[in-house]
Amino acid sequence: MLLQISSGQGPAECRLAVRLFCQAVQKEFAETRLIDVHGEYASALLDGPEDLATVCGTIAWICKSPLRPNHKRKNWYIHVSAVPELKEITKDSEVLVTTFRSGGPGGQNVNRVETAVRVVHPSTGITVVCSDERSQKQNKERALARLRVRLAALEAEVRGKQKDSAWQEHQKLVRGNPVRIYTGMDFVRDK
């Protein structure tokens, strides 16, 4: 499960809370690992077990500001949300290849030999047809190359959607009704 921890538009204390929360989660769930950090912990991405769903929501940190000693505020909030994971896009070994006779000019070979190739990627439904060459082997190589290009484009699109949804979650910080409350510079869980 992927989790995004975000300070939203909060001050430096919220970014510190993101860092401390990441450390606390990694201690609580041993198999959790930090994948990515943006802008000095303005946002962080964690990968871990399905149990992490219990920490999704608003996290409150009650502590006097360690960065600004005379600051009156002592409640800092961060947001934790689940990010949809990328679907694994399979490789060439999991494609269906069919051959058929290509039409058009080309002499006697056109009506007798199946030189055209259709490659279907079952998990995504992408179909590529190639009948450019007179050789079935060359058509198959070209079709697989075209399929790899389309799969790479699809993967880039999916990654872009994941980044967009992560950014939208970054902006969605709600103060109040926290799922967990931590206190003090030791970041001790209160609730």
Image (tube, helix red, strand yellow):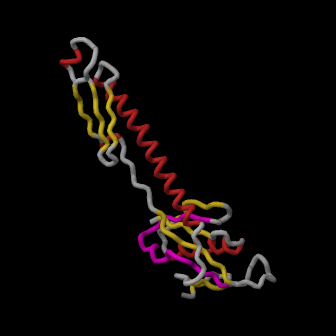
**For residue 183, what is the image quadrant?**
bottom right
Left or right: 28 as drawn, with respect to 70: left
Residue 58: in magenta span = yes
The image quadrant of residue 85 is bottom left
Quadrant of the rendered image containing residue 168: bottom right
Residue depicted at 41% across the width and 42% down the height: 151
Q: Nearer the viewer, residue 10 or 65?
A: 10
Residue 29 x/y as whole percent: 48, 73
Query: Is residue 66 covered in magenta?
Result: no
On screen, residue 63 above or below 86:
below
Residue located at (46% from left, 77% from top) = 54
Residue 80 position, x and y percent, is: 54, 72
Q: Say which quadrant the C terminus sits in.
A: bottom right
Outermost residue, left direction? 112
Q: Quadrant of the N terminus?
A: bottom left
Given residues 130 and 46, the one toward you in this image is 130
**Segment colored magenta:** 43-62
Q: Is 31 placed left or right of 44 in the picture?
A: left
Q: Residue furthest top?
A: 107
Q: Please, which residue is most extreme toward the right here?
A: 70
Q: Residue at x 41, y 38 (%)?
A: 148
Vertical side of 92 occupied by 142: above or below: above
Residue 113 coordinates in the image, percent (x, y): 20, 20
The tally of labels here is 0
- Residue at 28%, 29% (x, y): give it: 117
* Horizontal and vertical percent position of residue 45: 55, 63
69 sits to left or right of 44: right
- Give whichever of 2, 109 is nearer the camera: 109
Residue extending farthest to the front is 104
